[in-house]
Image: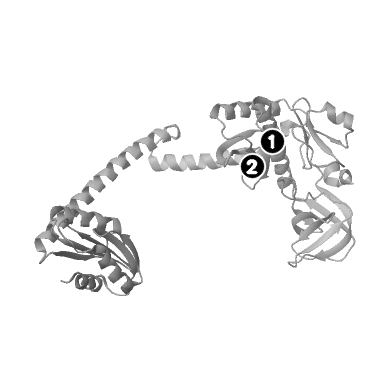
Amino acid sequence: MLKDRIYYQDAYLKTFTAWVIHRSEDANGRPYVVLDNTAFYPTGGGQPHDTGTINGVRVIDVEELDGEIRHFLEEDLPSGEEVKGVIDWERRFDHMQQHAGQHILTAAFVEYFGFQTVSFHLGNGVVSIDLDVEDVSADQLAAVEKLANGIILENRPIETKWDPTEDELTQFSLRKQLAVTDEIRLVIIPGFDYNGCGGTHPNSTGQVGLIKILSTEKQKRQVRVHFVCGGRVLQQLGRKHEELAIASRLLSAPEDGVGHAIEKLLVTNQVLEKSLEDTKVALLEFEASELLVSRSGRIVGASFSAKTVQELQKLARLLVASDDSIIALLVGDNEEKLQFVAARGATVEVSMKEVSSAVLPLINGKGGGNDAFVQGGGERIMSGEEFLDRMREVVGE
C-alpha cells in the first residue's frame, strides 16, 4: 500500500535498510533495483525524485513504473540482498519546502481572489504555478505573498490523512477535485488548505521558512508565477546581492544609488547614440556629394568593405534625391557575402528590378524591391568591384 512506503511513513528519515527484490536495466541500458520498501521519493505530482546512495552506489533517478519503484544507479550494485539507502537530505528538504510553499501560495490565491492553480513545476532554481486567470496585478501579488508568509509565521501543523470516508471528505473544503478514488492522501493545513497530494512535506508551515514571488509571465490565457521558498530565498538574495555589488562597483555608486546611476547612464547613452547617428548621417551626406562630383556619366557606383545594407540604402536615397537623372549602384563587400542596392532618379526609366534579376544569379542571391529601388545579397563568388562591373554592364554603361 502507498501509505506503507517509508517516505510517507517518515519524510525526515535519512537512512534505511531494505531488501533487493529485483535487479534489471531499462531499454537504454540504465541499471536499476527494486526494493521491498524505500525512502526514495519517485518523480511525480510536480515534485522531482530523490537522489542519494544505495550501498554507496549513487542513485541518479527514481521512477515509478508498472507499479514498482525503480532506483536507477550510476553502476550495478555489488552482490548482497540487504542494502542501506542514504537520502540526499539537502535535496529532499529543499523539495519539501518548495512543495509545501506551493500549497500555501496556491491556497492564498484562492483565499483572497479565487484564482485557481492549474499546474505546478518544481525546477532546480525556481518554482512556478500557472493560474487560471489572464492577469494578476502587483497589488494582488503583494497581498497573496503577505498572507502566505503570515501562514508560515504562524507555524501551523501540516497534517496528512489517508483514505478519508465520504462523510469526512464533505467536511473538508478541498481546493480541487481528487484525481484518485482509492488510497487517497490528503495534505492538510488546518483552517487554510485541504488538498489531495502525493508529495513530501515538512511537519509545519514554519519549516517552509519564507516565500518570495520573483516574477510573472503570461502563458496564453493564464499567468505563470515564479517563486522560491526556504533556503532558495537566501540563494536568490545572495545572487542578487552579488550582482548588485558588481553593478555598484562598475558604476562607482553606492548600492542604494545603483538605480539612479543606471538612469543617468541610460540618458548619457541615448545622447551618445543620437550624436553617433547624426555623425553617420553627416558622413553619408558627405560621401554622397563626393560620389556625385566624381561620377562620369549617369551611373554613380561604388563598392564598400564596411557598410551595412541599411547604410547602402540610405546612401542610395541621398544620391537619387540629390540628382534625379542618375542611377546609384552600391555594393557591400562583407567577407562571406555580397550585398547591393540599386536605385534610380525620378527621370530615369531603366527598371532596377531588371538589373536585380540579371545579377542575382551571379551570386546565388535573393532580393526584393520595385522598378525604382531594389536590394539584395548572396555569396561572395566574386569581389565587390567585379560585381559592380557586372551591374554596370546590365545597365549598359
| Badge 1: residue crowd in 10 Å (few <14, some 14–19, many ≥20) | many
Q: Type of residue at label 2?
A: Val
Q: Can residue 45 be seen in this view?
A: yes
| Badge 2: residue crowd in 10 Å (few <14, some 14–19, many ≥20) | many
Front position in the image: 326 or 227: 326
Name the residue rendered at 57%, 32% in the picture: 136
Res 162 → quadrant: top right
Q: Tally the numbered discs.
A: 2
Q: Name the residue under label 1.
A: 101
Q: Can residue 308 be seen in this view?
A: no
Q: Type of residue at label 1?
A: Gly
Front position in the image: 318 or 281: 318
Q: Residue 269 vs residue 304: left or right?
A: right
Name the residue rendered at 64%, 42% in the picture: 127
Image: 140 above or below 62: above
Earlier-in-chain disc, 1 versus 2: 1
Q: Where is residue 211 in the image (x, y as percent from the top left)?
A: 64, 34
Q: Position of residue 394 (x, y in %)?
A: 22, 71
Front position in the image: 72 or 191: 191
The residue positioned farthest toward the front in the image shown: 349
Q: Distance between the residues labelled 1 and 2?
A: 9 Å
Q: Mark 2 points at which residue?
A: 127
Res 353 → quadrant: bottom left
Q: Position of residue 356 (x, y in %)?
A: 28, 66
> What element does badge 2 sit on?
strand
Q: Residue 268 vs residue 169: left or right?
A: left
> What element does badge 1 sit on?
helix
The quarter of the picture where the C terminus appears is bottom left
